[in-house]
Image (cartoon, coloured by chain):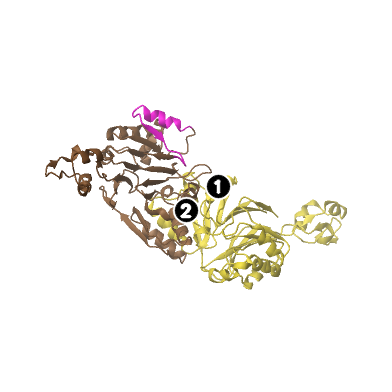
Chain colours: A yellow, B brown
Amino acid sequence: MKLTILGCHSATPRINTNPTSQVLEINNHIFLIDCGEGTQVELRRNKVKFNRIKHIFISHLHGDHYFGLIGLISTFRLLTRETELHIYAPKGLKELVTLQMKLANSWTNYQLIFHELTSHEPELIFEDEKVAVYTIPLDHRIYTNGFLFKEKPGLRKLDMNAAIEADIDMAYFNKLKQGFDVENNKGKLVKNETVTKDPPEPRSYAFCSDTAYNEKLVNNILGVTALYHEATFLEKHEKLTIPTKHSTAKQAASIAKQANVGTLILGHFSTRYDNLDLFKEEAQTVFKHVELAKDGKVFSF
Amino acid sequence: MKLTILGCHSATPRINTNPTSQVLEINNHIFLIDCGEGTQVELRRNKVKFNRIKHIFISHLHGDHYFGLIGLISTFRLLTRETELHIYAPKGLKELVTLQMKLANSWTNYQLIFHELTSHEPELIFEDEKVAVYTIPLDHRIYTNGFLFKEKPGLRKLDMNAAIEADIDMAYFNKLKQGFDVENNKGKLVKNETVTKDPPEPRSYAFCSDTAYNEKLVNNILGVTALYHEATFLEKHEKLTIPTKHSTAKQAASIAKQANVGTLILGHFSTRYDNLDLFKEEAQTVFKHVELAKDGKVFSF
């Protein structure tokens, strides 16, 4: 699982900072999460192959989270993309993109499939054999979802020596990997756990931006490997979190602690701060495993 | 008259090139012309004060000419702008921007005034004491206008020595500057041209992007100081100008020659070309005074 931060600042693009966008590579998928203005350039800068992006997840319709999307959709057409593209976003985006295309007398050569989100409960929005993606309802000024990316448990690992010693025919190895007990060549039942090992712990990533501090979030992200939680403000500006429905670093850390996550990644920093190290310092008074997002930074889990 | 090129490439933004946008400073105005994705960052890079932009001219609703506009409008609000903003653009943009604001549950603190363009004839769209701006109908795949920025003739220059020698009272000097003949202290009529000189030649700038080669353009840009004319293609790709309704460098030069302009600036280069010098070479086989636009380049006239 590899997470590339394309942009992690609030508000609008500046010469050296970008609004929210990130790329999650998980089990051979390249998921694009949010798409602020300039994302297509950051994708190029970070050498992400455009054609491998098949699913784009948009948290909410504030500009710093999606103004780069229409440009990307247009670019895909110019590059004669044929691969279908799925967009998971709040209701309204489809109408907007359709209007923009109508005004440009334009279209897409590829299938553009909108999955319009309206639910205020977590829902499964994508699934294949290895990965599932759920929405995480967030508490912001407009309808907003975070996204939970979960690997499914893999096959059990066969202990080859133990299996041979137990005299099990190769034909049963797949059944063993799937967790079943099997009979050996002598007709004796062999317990699965004596010849297999647990698969690696499935990894999971929760993206939560933008949101006020809200403990309802905790249950939806329990034990994730990594949590990206917005931290727009430092503690001295905590009162700004109320009208804006954003969070402080310390509030993000409190959520991380209650949810017992592996690593907390902070982002969506207000552009008023020069020294971002303070975000880490303040968060670490509550929760130890804190990282700061940074444009261009890559996290591997 | 100072022209700053923010972006001059066709299609979409890349790491080192930007789509169309330029800033024209003329008689204390800062006019923004087109606004491709990333324009707000380029404005910052080129140190253009956001608050001085009061008029934005959008040629047409292909994304590489306006996808940066909504971000700029949002940024203006975040910066608590109070100055009103006029946008001159094809009909449709107002509906789009209004929908985007509705979806974000957002607004502007400043007055946002749309001047929706629909005419296929040149029309006066802005005027004050010193400058007038006209549309220039262009020939593209969708409804498109260029823009003609014209200084008005200034006051005549008083030849102070000649005026004193002619025994004219100071009270008449303003009348002289306005071009009138006046009586001197002895009651004798003094011809204006004997005590004044012509004002500097009014300067003018024509922005013409995007357009197919079309000689109807010539009459609308006769004798301009500088003409920006798109040159998407080199001659070897001339056949592409027909379906795309773009021009070659040589076609742009032919328009410049017929219109007897001062300087031709080429831009809107297709990103397929590495060596842009060829655009200048090909154009100069037809018209001598050719310059190449370049992101960040400043032209003074």
Residue, disc 2: A70
Q: Amino acid at mark 2?
A: Ile
Q: Is residue A197 visible?
A: yes
Q: Residues within 10 Å of mark 1 (few under 14, many from 20)?
A: some
Chain containing mark 1: A
Image quarter (top left, top right, bottom left or bottom right) of the C terminus of chain B:
top left
Q: Is residue A151 visible?
A: no
Q: Position of residue A296 (x, y in %)?
A: 62, 50
Q: Look at the image and say whether residue B36 sits in the magenta stretch.
A: no
The magenta stretch is B275-297
Q: Is residue B54 left or right of residue B15?
A: left
| B135 up-or-down from B288: above or below | below
Report helix, strand or loop for mark 1.
Answer: helix
N-term mark: 1 or 2: 1
Q: Position of residue B154 (x, y in %)?
A: 27, 44
| A55 up-or-down from A119: above or below | above
Q: CA distance from mark 1 to mark 2?
A: 14 Å
Residue, disc 1: A50
| B282 up-or-down from A111: above or below | above
Q: Residue at x 34, y 58 (%)?
A: B114
Closer to the eye: label 1 or 2? 2
Closer to us: A229 or B41: B41
The image quarter containing residue A260 is bottom right
Q: Is residue B273 left or right of residue A199?
A: left
Q: Are marks 1 and 2 on the same chain?
A: yes
